[in-house]
Amino acid sequence: MIGASGGHGGGDEHLVLDFVDYIRGGEPSVSCATLDDSMTSHLTVFRAEQARKSGTVVKI
């Protein structure tokens, strides 16, 4: 399913549309993240998975 009833409730489509608008010279949308923000969020998720698997608290 795609559109408003699929693809994360239409979020996937909006991310693509925001990206296309940005590379065409538009302003970055609120969903546009910096590389640092993206790396931090990925690290957080990887550490959460490590904590889940090991049953321990993992520092970030």
Image (cartoon, rainbow, N blue to C red):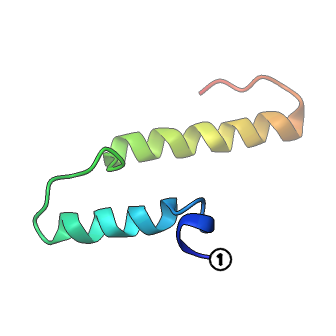
Residue type at mark 1?
A: Met
Question: Count the marks: how many?
Answer: 1
| Relative side of 48 to 16, left or right | right
Q: Secondary structure at mark 1?
A: loop
Q: Is residue 33 above or below residue 17?
A: above
Q: Nearer the viewer, residue 13 or 32?
A: 13
The spot of residue 31 in percent (x, y) is 36, 48
User: Which image quadrant for residue 7?
Assistant: bottom right
User: Residue at coordinates 43% horizontally, 46% vertically from top-left?
Assistant: 38
Name above or below for residue 15 compared with residue 1.
Answer: above
Q: Position of residue 35 (x, y in %)?
A: 34, 49
Viewer-side residue, 59 vs 40:
40
In the rendered image, residue 18, in percent from the top left (x then y), is placed at: 30, 62
Residue that badge 1 annotates = 1
Quarter residue 51 falls in = top right
Depth order, front residue of 7/34: 7
**Residue drawn 19% across the image and 69% down it:** 23
- Binning the other alpha carbons within 10 Å of mark 1 as few (below 14), some (14 to 19) or many (20 upward) gives few
Picture residue at 39% right of the left edge, 40% below the top? 37
State the residue lying farthest toward the bottom.
1
Point out residue 59 in the picture as x, y percentages from the top left corner.
65, 24
Left or right placement of residue 40 versus residue 5 in this view: left
Q: Is residue 56 left or right of residue 19?
A: right
